[in-house]
Amino acid sequence: MSVSLKESKTKENLLRAFAGESQAANRYTFAANVAKNNKLHLVEEVFLFTANQERAHAKVFFDHLKEVAGENIYIDGNFPVDISDDIVSLLNKAKHNEFEEFEDAYPNFAKIAKEEGFAQIAASFELIAKVEKTHGERFGFYAKMLEENKLYQSDTSGIWMCLNCGHIVTGNKAPEICPVCQYDQGYFVPIEYAPYSDKAMLGL
């Protein structure tokens, strides 16, 4: 059943997705500030990194609406109000929301888009759904690390990098203060999660 975008359900689903992604980008920016206030710089960066990707998703969905530019489109929907000073709670709520998009919302939107004859839009929903799964897994990973008190310490000897100056430390725990730049522990990250680096590259 091929229909015009103007008369489609896909038009509304694109705007729902745009609204959801835009809100997620803002929620994660707000959550990053909570992480910053708790001196969790690594978690702050995770939220900001993901927020930028959500903003990119929003643009993809918005660009698909060029054909109906200038219209006002009515939509309804449920959107989360995730407000907390507890960073683990914010991470877990973000995980839940990302998996909801991956498992339910975007597969359904893709199905409708295919039925209405919008193959390219359906592909965008399907591909972005897979990214949301990655987001959910990443949020869940850092929530678990914090809950188990393993983000800055390890049961065995580990390697840590300061994200501010690049100083590398070996031991069971990241230092409370970086001996090079004097930044606090919240800037340290296990070397396997350091951006653009791995042990082989660093000769470790």
Image (cartoon, helix red, strand yellow):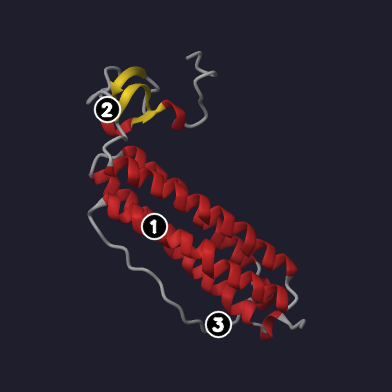
**SS under mark 2:** loop
Task: Kindly give the residue lying farthest to the front in the view shown.
Answer: 155
- Can residue 47 be seen? no
Report the side of 200 relative to 3 (left or right): left
**SS under mark 3:** loop
What residue is at 48 percent from the left and 32 percent from the top?
195
| Of pointers 2 and 3, the one earlier in the residue sequence | 3
In contact (CB < 8 Å): disc 1 and disc 3? no
| Of pointers 1 and 3, the one earlier in the residue sequence | 3
Q: Position of residue 174 (x, y in %)?
A: 29, 25
Task: Kindly give the residue lying farthest to the top in the view shown.
Answer: 203
Q: From the image, tell me which residue sits under label 2.
A: 183
Q: Is residue 136 above or below residue 163?
A: below
Q: Residue 73 — which label?
A: 3
Report the side of 81 relative to 37 (left or right): right
Q: Nearer the viewer, mark 2 or mark 1?
A: 1
Q: Position of residue 149 (x, y in %)?
A: 26, 37
Q: Residue 65 — which label?
A: none
Q: Nearer the viewer, mark 1 or mark 3?
A: 1
**SS under mark 1:** helix
Q: CA distance from mark 1 to mark 3?
A: 27 Å
Q: From the image, tell me which residue sits under label 1.
A: 94
